[in-house]
Amino acid sequence: MPFNDANAPSPLGLTAHEFARAHARIPGGAADAYRRLFRDGDATALPGLTLPEPARVQRSQSPEGEVVKFVLRVPPNLETESVLIPMVGRTRGRTYTLCVSSQVGCAMGCTFCETAQMGLLRSLTPAEIVAQWFAATHHLRLRPKNIVFMGMGEPLDNLAGVLAAIRALTDHLGAAHPMSRIVVSTVGRLDGLARLAAQVREPGWHRLGLAVSINAPNDQIRSRIMPINRAMPMAALREALLAWPIFGAAKICLEYVLIPGVNDATEHARELASWARPLPACINVIPYNPRRDSPWPAPDEASVDHFLGDLVAAGAYCKRRRTKGREMMGACGQLGNPQLRRPRLVRLGAPASSP
Ligand code: SAH
């Protein structure tokens, strides 16, 4: 019996309960088959189920260990990209953070991001999202400590798929990944944030992490580099973040991609700090990783330090994200396959396109 078609959806995208309801007659019991699949990568009780296997794996060294980027094929002839990022903790043990994709491509159109150059090809199913965790854990044998939705795609544009994937990943009867070790990163769509906030108020969801890509100190700059800002400006975004349910000492992560000559001036740091002041948040400064055909260079060390110093001086709580995987286009904002770009409409007769 095949498990990965429409009649019998793959168990990877289901909770143990949902799976048992759909497959009550598995010999030995659906719950047992589910547990063995997620815990041990063992699918012997599930004949016909194709286990996720990377089509390509690339590795590169970083000071904290090997960064591993891998690709899974998904129909029709598309690919997901995921990255395993090593981290050395205070106790010196090495752990991995898995950066997963929620879509193939993205519709948000941020000008600094490689994925945006592809356009949106499609959203991933819950099973295709969880398959990335499965391949990391059972194929590459690097069980991630953290899962971050910071790969290709805008998670709030595939909210139902992302929520179902998180339900499967956190199911105690299977993968049992802690909710507190999952972060959803978004451009900050207000409708999606409100829906996600409602979910986070539910039992079991309080500790889900939120990261929001701010990337600019004011509307003028943000609208230029993030088209979403034209419809949903920073004041409205801040209102939505003030309404975000915070449990315990959790903080919202504000991501800020530092792009030379665009958003890296001292004045920008001050403006950003004052915008962020009312929020229970930490500003995460990410040195810009050049996308293909980038009009901007990466910032140098000194200017990253300088910007962080400016933020601290302005009273902001901030951190720096260490760059890993840039050599293989595996760092933040570099995922995307130029061969898979969505065909662009060519306007006939437009002066720029005439021969
Ligand atoms: N769509 C979601 C998740 C994907 S992007 C979002 O926007 O949050 C994950 C993070 O990478 C975001 O904070 C984004 O701002 C950042 N990013 C995008 N392009 C980048 C680049 N070229 N260099 C560094 N970070 C980048």
Image (cartoon, rainbow, N blue to C red):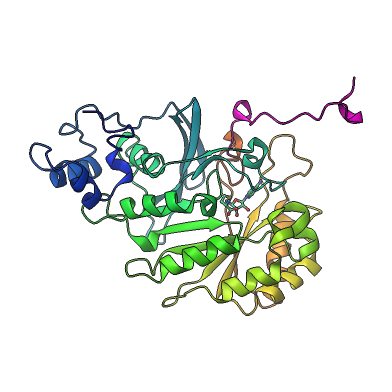
Check residue 155 for magenta coloring. no
Q: Residue at x 63, y 44 (%)?
A: 107
Q: Quadrant of the C terminus?
A: top right
* Image position, residue 203 (x, y; %): 32, 70
Is residue 158 found left or right of 92 in the rendered image? right
How far across and down, in percent of the image, does residue 130 sit?
37, 44
Magenta span main SS: loop
Which quadrant of the rendered structure holds the N terminus?
top left
Front in this rendered view, residue 134 or 4: 4
Q: Residue at x 54, y 51 (%)?
A: 157
Give the vertical position of 239 relative to 5 (above or below): below
Was residue 340 drawn as part of the magenta stretch in this picture?
yes
Q: Is residue 96 visible?
A: yes
| Spot occupied by residue 53 in the image (x, y as percentages of width and height) | 36, 29
Residue 42 is drawn in which quadrant? top left
Horizontal side of 295 relative to 52 (left or right) equals right
Q: Which residues are magenta?
A: 335-355
Where does residue 13 sit, x and y in percent of width and height? 33, 44
Q: Quadrant of residue 340?
A: top right
Residue 260 to residue 327: above or below: below
The vertical placement of 102 against 217, above or below, is above
Q: Is residue 79 left or right of residue 348?
A: left
- The residue depicted at 53 percent of the width and 56 percent of the height is 185
Q: Is residue 211 visible?
A: no
Quadrant in which residue 38 is drawn: top left
Q: Between residues 29 and 86, which one lies in front from this camera angle? A: 29
**Image label count:** 0
Front-lying residue, 59 or 76: 76
